[in-house]
Image (cartoon, rainbow, N blue to C red):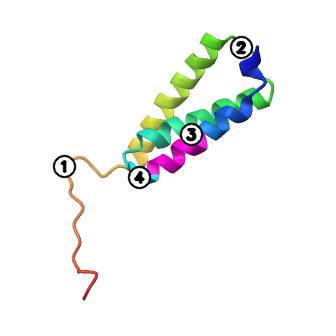
Amino acid sequence: MLWLQVWWVWISFGLVLGILEIFLPSFVCLGFGIAAVLTGALIAIGLSVSLPQLFLIYAILSLASWLLLRRFLQLKSGSVKTFDQDIND
């Protein structure tokens, strides 16, 4: 039950993944980071589950957050981001 006492590790892992998203912009690291922070918050409020169940919760939250990020932040299918003006004009 040691993993239930270190909720801050999950939150720290989530913050590291959020920072990593700055360097690898693909929503993957951010989705995993959001799920890690949510998992840490669930542990902090008193969720008592076994380690395999905890990893299952993390996997489900990761998938859900990645799908939501992809749905709301990704460009529409078939569209290309274009710029009308140059920044140096």
Q: Which residues are magenta?
A: 14-21
**Tag 2: amino acid:** Val
| 3 on left or right of 85 | right
For residue 35, what is the image quadrant?
A: top right
Q: Residue drawn at (57%, 25%), measured in percent from left and top?
A: 58
Between the C-alphas of marks 3 and 1, the distance is 28 Å
Where residue 82 sits: x, y (%)? 22, 66
**Tag 4: amino acid:** Phe
Quarter of the image containing the C terminus? bottom left
Between the C-alphas of marks 4 and 3, the distance is 16 Å
The tag earlier along the polypeptide, 1 or 4, is 4
- Magenta region includes residue 20: yes
Where residue 63 sits: x, y (%)? 46, 29
Q: Which residue is mark 4?
A: 23
- Magenta region includes residue 42: no
Q: Nearer the viewer, mark 3 or mark 1?
A: 3
Where residue 21 sits: x, y (%)? 45, 48
Q: Which residue is mark 2?
A: 49
Between the C-alphas of marks 1 and 4, the distance is 25 Å
Instruction: Please tell me whether mark 2 sits on a helix, a strand or a loop.
Output: loop
**Tag 1: amino acid:** Gly
Between the C-alphas of marks 1 and 2, the distance is 43 Å
Instruction: Please tell me whether mark 4 sits on a helix, a strand or a loop.
Output: helix
Q: Residue drawn at (68%, 33%), measured in percent from left and top?
A: 9
Instruction: Please tell me whether mark 1 sits on a helix, a strand or a loop.
Output: loop
Dominant SS of magenta comes to helix
Between the C-alphas of marks 2 and 3, the distance is 20 Å
Q: Which mark is residue 78?
A: 1
